[in-house]
Amino acid sequence: MTGDPPTVESNFITDLFAQLAEFAAGAETWQQVGVLLIAGAIPFIESYLGSFLGVLVGVPAGLAVPAAILGNVIVTFALIALASKARVAATRRRGNGGGGGADAPRRKQKIAKYLDRFGVPGVCLLGPIVVASQITAPALVALGATKRSVYVWQAVAIVAWGVLFGFFGDLAAGWFM
């Protein structure tokens, strides 16, 4: 063997991204917006790669960025709501003890470590570097962060990453096309 093979997840995301790009490139603008809504909803593609993809295949940034952001927000917010309901149900089953104390759900979890270090704003803003927002946001709620703060900061992060990568996509498109 000459080296470690790429991970299955990276191959899957790379292949999916390439397939989305190929499909979007040959579609009408309204279909491209639909592809970007779907791309934004996919973990690890999300608003940032969806925006980048859209601008690179020729979708105007004013359509590409909001479409990818909207797809990411819809799925992430739905997962936050589900995680909140699950946490409430679990807490009720355990009684009024608060679900085993503040430290109980934080055992050996990366997100919990970062939550302790950076708080909800930091985890939401930096989270896409490490893990998808569709994983980070519900995990924050499950760990005891307030649903409201996770909604607010995750929305800020999704918009910021989408706009930033849409801008980079626009720059890249200008350089290479």
Image: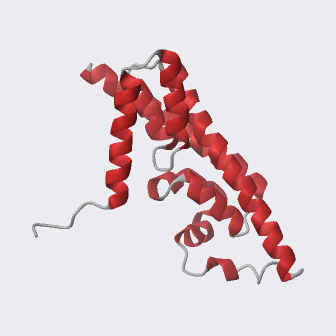
Which quadrant is home to the C terminus? top left
Tell me the quarter of the picture where residue 150 sits: bottom right
Q: Is residue 87 left or right of residue 58?
A: right
Which quadrant is home to the N terminus? bottom left
Q: Quick one: 5 or 63, which is closer to the camera?
A: 5
Tell me the quarter of the picture where residue 67 sits: top right
Q: Position of residue 126 (x, y in %)?
A: 52, 54
> Please, is residue 101 above or below residue 24 in the view?
below
Q: Residue at x 58, y 35 (%)?
A: 69
Whether residue 167 is visible to the viewer of this picture, yes or no, is no
Q: Residue at x 26, y 60 (%)?
A: 6
Q: Quick one: 128 or 75, which is closer to the camera?
A: 75
Q: Quick one: 168 or 59, which is closer to the camera?
A: 59
User: Which residue ends up furthest to the left in the rendered image?
Assistant: 2
Q: Is residue 100 left or right of residue 153?
A: right
Q: Residue at x 38, y 40 (%)?
A: 17
User: How was this image coloured?
Assistant: secondary structure
> Please, is residue 68 above or below residue 112 in the view?
above
Q: Quick one: 165 or 51, which is closer to the camera?
A: 51
Q: Is residue 102 left or right of residue 61?
A: right
Q: Residue at x 33, y 23 (%)?
A: 173
Q: Position of residue 140 (x, y in %)?
A: 66, 63
